[in-house]
Amino acid sequence: MDEVAFDDFYAASYRRLVGQLHAMIGDRAEAEECVQEAFARAWSHRRTIETAQHPEAWVRTTAYRLAVSRWRRVRLGRRPADRAVGAATVADGPDAVRLDVVAALARLGEDQRRALVLFHLADLSVEDVAREVGAPVGTVKARLSRGRAALARLLADHAPEGTPHA
């Protein structure tokens, strides 16, 4: 992949990947940093990525792994006294519904959240989600089903009064 093709790939994919990772991890600034780092790594692996069928999946997976690694480092680096102090999450963006969905996603288990984001936001097929997360198709289907049910309950709990529950 030459420089122009890589720039086009970046321009076409960056915002979408940040949105997907934000939904997976719940922190937009962290998502932006991880996607930027993943693209930097993609540049140095561009010849390998060029032969890959889904370069966007490569960048998304790399960004997700970076986010998980960073989260683990922060978590392990905390002393017991620090754990008593909860860090407030600052939500960005004006859309209250989007914020509710991201907050509800953050309350799901990591596997369910990742499956839901990849399937619904990244528009991957169940088979592609299974391949990307390294799980059997049946497991991904179960995660999607359970994740949707849990998400519906969480969002129903936050519905404004007078709004019918589905």
Image: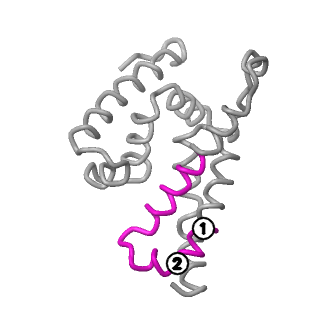
> Residue 58: within the magenta?
yes
Give how far apart the Cα atoms at labels 1 and 2 are.
8 Å
Residue drawn at x 41%, y 19% as measured from the top left:
153
Q: Which secondary structure class fits the magenta region best?
A: helix
- Pick out the residue farthest to the top: 161
Q: Which residue is mark 1?
A: 41
For label 2, the SS is helix
Compare marks 1 and 2 and give the one earlier in the sequence. Answer: 1
Residue drawn at x 55%, y 34% as measured from the top left:
102
Apparent side of residue 120 relative to residue 136 in the rendered image (left or right): right
Question: Where is residue 111 drawn, in percent x and y?
Answer: 41, 36
Residue drawn at x 54%, y 69% as measured from the top left:
12
Boundaries of the magenta span: 39-67
Question: Where is residue 66 drawn, in percent x and y?
Answer: 59, 51
Q: Residues within 10 Å of mark 1 (few under 14, many from 20)?
A: some
Q: Residues within 10 Å of mark 2 (few under 14, many from 20)?
A: some
The front one of 106 and 64 is: 64
